Amino acid sequence: MKRLEELLAGYQSVVLGTLGSNGYPFSSYAPFYYDGELLYIFISDMATHTKNIQTTPRASTLFIEDESKSENIFARKRISLQCDVTSVSKDEERFQTVMKQFQHKFDAPLVTMLMGLKDFNLYALKPLYGEATFGFGEAYHIGGEKMNELVTRSGENGHKR
């Protein structure tokens, strides 16, 4: 059975769903890094999704197969995770470790420049529950000790919040 890390390897960005102060959901996207347990996004305080997660520290994430690569528009491969969000301080050792991974994964000079901006901050998204669908009848829950494994669905809802 594949692990979440393998499934996310082909993605560079994640679609984010956050909750606005008006009570309505807001969709956007951000580049991400996944360490096998947590998703990290490095985003500007000026962005609406940042303001939303600072107020309500939860996010929904969606990784979805490109339409042009899907044989059936109704059966696009996708992974959805519901996450708690925490800020990672620039003073934490973890900040430097994760940002080195961002530099490795993306354009290093651009990431270095963004790191110098005061309004860009790092956030950690911890998956609480989720699901993955790879076609008709091929759906899984995301589970395991670190919420990074596919688990066969047994018909129930999958989230216990």
Image (cartoon, grey):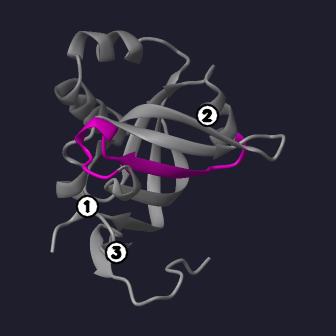
User: Which mark is on residue 4?
Assistant: 1
Measure how far apart labels 2 and 3 are at the Cα level.
Answer: 28 Å
Tell me if I can see residue 91 in this picture: no
| Residue 66 lies in the magenta-colored region | yes
Q: Amino acid at mark 3?
A: Tyr
Q: Position of residue 152 (x, y in %)?
A: 31, 83
Q: Residue at label 2?
A: 49
Residue bearing the label numbered 3? 140
Residue 42 placement: quadrant: top left
Is 31 placed above or below 76 here? Answer: above
Estimate the spatial distance between the alpha carbons at disc 1 and disc 2, rounded to whole Å. Answer: 24 Å
Query: Which residue shows up at 35% across the image and 58% down it?
Result: 75
Examine the image and state in which quarter residue 126 appears.
bottom left
Kindly identify the residue that appears in the image at 40 percent across and 14 percent down.
114
Please determine whether, in this image, residue 156 is positioned above or below residue 65: below
The residue mark sitting in front, 2 or 3, is 3
Position of the N terminus, as image quadrant, is bottom left
Quarter of the picture holding the C terminus = bottom right
104 left or right of 41? left
- Sequence-wise, the earlier of marks 3 and 1 is 1
Q: Amino acid at mark 2?
A: His
Q: Earlier in the sequence, mark 2 or mark 3?
A: 2
